Image (tube, grey):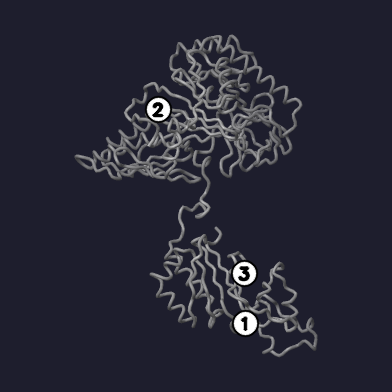
């Protein structure tokens, strides 16, 4: 389910009219991009974690790693940023070189960002700990990884990008007309400062000279301001930050095919109105201020669409479905025929399902912003011609994706391996967190498995409970198993114990946790204290020497035990032998079971309410 009607038959090369819907609330801004009425992209920015990509900062090198040819740099974020040697430029705008006179082996030469083929220098020859350098965030911190940074600073405008590290003029490869490429290059070359470089963006195709000149003036002033701040800034400090999300979307997404932009906040509406009039060439998209009482995303059916597309299973129109499994290392997408049975033969059914799945896979990659390594498991096709059809369809649809992709041929097993550039967290990471109940595993022990596990754990400590009545508190579903299908095993354990085992269902208790409580007193239990070394004859003295029978390791000296407290790593107070000086405490009613903890498993040998805490699952 998605917004409005989804056009699954549109041509890949057809122009895509779109709309931009912006929900701006206190603390969070969401931008939905609609193509043909369908939700194609969702961008989210929150005040607590604004995107750091594009930020220019003065950083301090905190660690140089020769083994990785990289360095960690403190730029003021929670985690140190990662700088690879090939992404660093010296003050002259070139890769540093400790030995410029030496010729590098051709086999180890590499092509730098400025187009020169040369060997990157050793990281330890150009950077040192404590050094302050100017860098830009190229990739967001993702998961446990810090931000990826570069000293190849670039500032994006509406039609062009400022590249001060490369004093030349480039043109986007997506502008195919050679005549237009020459025109744009000539316009920028005539008006640009000699010491600055520019790249003409795809959005600059057909732009007027006046619009490009306005972009050059704006970007030049931004760079001059960065240089001024750099003179007085001390690391770590920020020199330049990117525009807010609504303005970035206008700059990067809005084009001649954008029909309208709808925003529900008056202040953001005014900011966007000013930005459109200053930086967007005609024909400009219509800017509307949404004033209805209903939330804007509900009005455009976007909220429901977001929920529908976050699931693990995605249904296809034919009745087939995709299963999307995302992990830290890669994303696996499995294609299944599901309810689709076809009409003529199996090969035709499989081909039709795979071709339909290709469109949905490309949509899901873009909508969820899935990056990194991706494995697509198509349904096996016997015909090599059919495999080629599916591959070409996937290749063609991926050309519309702005993110850089690399795709390999379909293997004999029907697998496609591909990569997609990852610059920020995917939608699942932004909106979700690991399940607090299963701890992110995606599964828990079944009720029956947990019931048998409880009985096994009690059986392990059976000698401590013999002759006593005990109660076991468990999750309600586990209690049903203990009193139902697993009842025979429970009765067998009760016979071995010599007393009935009371099963208590406790609402709210995790299925993989349980507690065992002794309800009455019993005979003393000898506790082996093999970890307590015996005193030597010299330490004990002649009066303290004992016979071999008296020095049994199962009995600890009262003064030794008294000196141990739970905080010192010894036994809890409940496990100490009774003190003849102190009266025993009378037991009144059932004891309150202790919550399961990570403390040592112990039994009170004398008190009337011994507790045996258990905690499962184990810590990973």
Earlier sequence position, callout 1 versus callout 2: 2
Earlier sequence position, callout 1 versus callout 3: 1
Q: Name the residue rendered at 64%, 25% in the picture.
A: 94
In the image, which is nearer the foreground, mark 2 or mark 3?
2
Q: What distance separates the C-alpha of mark 1 from that of mark 3?
A: 16 Å
| Residue 154 occupies quadrant | top right
Query: In the figure, is residue 155 to the left or right of 58?
Result: left
Q: Name the residue rendered at 75%, 31% in the picture.
A: 234
Would you place residue 142 above or below residue 529 in this image? above
Category of crowding for the residue at label 1, using alpha-carbon neighbours closer than 10 angstroms: few (below 14), some (14–19), many (at least 20): few
The quadrant of the picture occupied by the C terminus is: bottom right
Q: What distance separates the C-alpha of mark 1 from that of mark 2?
A: 75 Å
- Give the farthest residue toward the front: 293
Q: Position of residue 41 (x, y in %)?
A: 46, 31
The residue indicated by pointer 2 is: 37
Query: Which element is circle 1 on?
Result: loop
The residue indicated by pointer 1 is: 526
Query: Which element is circle 2 on?
Result: loop
Would you place residue 574 above or below residue 550 in this image? above
Category of crowding for the residue at label 3, using alpha-carbon neighbours closer than 10 angstroms: few (below 14), some (14–19), many (at least 20): few
């Amino acid at each position: 389910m998605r917004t409005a009607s989804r056009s699954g038959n549109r041509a890949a090369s057809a122009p895509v009219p779109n709309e931009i819907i912006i929900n701006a609330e206190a603390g969070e801004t969401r931008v939905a991009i609609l193509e043909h009425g369908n939700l194609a992209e969702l961008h989210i920015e929150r005040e607590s974690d604004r995107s750091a990509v594009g930020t220019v900062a003065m950083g301090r090198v905190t660690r140089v790693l020769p083994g990785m040819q990289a360095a960690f740099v403190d730029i003021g974020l929670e985690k140190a940023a990662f700088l690879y040697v090939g992404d660093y430029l010296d003050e002259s705008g070139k890769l540093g070189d400790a030995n410029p006179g030496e010729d590098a082996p051709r086999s180890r030469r590499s092509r730098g960002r400025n187009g020169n083929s040369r060997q990157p220098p050793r990281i330890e020859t150009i950077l040192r700990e404590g050094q302050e350098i100017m860098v830009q965030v190229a990739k967001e911190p993702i998961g446990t990884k810090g931000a990826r940074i570069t000293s190849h600073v670039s500032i994006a405008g509406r039609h062009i990008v400022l590249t001060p590290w490369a004093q030349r003029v480039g043109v986007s490869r997506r502008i195919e007309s050679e005549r237009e490429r020459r025109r744009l290059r000539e316009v920028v070359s005539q008006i640009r400062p000699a010491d600055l470089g520019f790249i003409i963006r795809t959005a600059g195709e057909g732009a007027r000279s006046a619009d490009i000149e306005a972009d050059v003036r704006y970007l030049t002033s931004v760079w001059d301001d960065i240089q001024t701040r750099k003179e007085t800034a001390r690391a770590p400090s920020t020199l330049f930050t990117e525009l807010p999300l609504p303005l970035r979307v206008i700059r990067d997404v809005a084009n001649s095919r954008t029909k309208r932009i709808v925003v529900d906040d008056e202040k953001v509406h005014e900011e966007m109105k000013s930005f459109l009039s200053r930086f967007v060439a005609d024909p400009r998209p219509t800017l509307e201020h949404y004033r209805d009482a209903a939330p804007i995303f509900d009005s455009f059916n976007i909220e429901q669409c977001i929920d529908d597309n976050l699931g693990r299973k995605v249904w296809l129109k034919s009745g087939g479905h995709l299963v999307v499994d995302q992990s830290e290392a890669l994303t696996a997408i499995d294609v299944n025929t599901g309810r689709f049975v076809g009409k003529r033969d199996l090969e035709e059914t499989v081909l039709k399902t795979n071709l339909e799945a290709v469109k949905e896979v490309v949509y899901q990659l873009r909508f969820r912003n899935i990056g990194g390594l991706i494995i697509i498991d198509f349904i096996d096709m016997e015909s090599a011609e059919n495999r080629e059809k599916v591959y070409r369809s996937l290749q063609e649809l991926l050309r519309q994706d702005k993110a850089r992709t690399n795709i390999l041929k379909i293997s004999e097993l029907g697998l496609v391996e591909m990569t997609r550039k990852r610059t920020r967290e995917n939608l699942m990471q932004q909106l979700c967190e690991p399940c607090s109940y299963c701890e992110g595993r995606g599964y828990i022990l079944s009720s029956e498995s947990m019931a048998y596990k409880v009985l096994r754990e009690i059986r392990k400590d059976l000698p401590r409970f013999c002759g006593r009545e005990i109660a076991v508190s468990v999750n309600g579903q586990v209690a049903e198993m203990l009193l139902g299908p697993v009842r025979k095993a429970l009765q067998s354990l009760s016979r071995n114990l010599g007393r009935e085992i009371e099963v208590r269902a406790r609402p709210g208790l995790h299925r993989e946790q349980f507690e065992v409580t002794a309800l009455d007193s019993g005979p003393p239990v000898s506790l082996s204290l093999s970890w307590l070394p015996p005193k030597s004859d010299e330490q004990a003295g002649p009066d303290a020497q004992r016979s071999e029978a008296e020095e049994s390791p199962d009995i600890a000296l009262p003064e030794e035990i008294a000196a141990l407290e739970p905080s010192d790593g010894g036994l809890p107070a409940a496990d100490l032998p009774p003190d003849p000086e102190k009266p025993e405490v009378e037991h009144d009613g059932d004891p309150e079971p202790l919550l399961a903890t990570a403390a040592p498993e112990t039994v009170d040998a004398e008190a009337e309410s011994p507790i045996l805490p258990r905690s499962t699952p184990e810590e990973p």
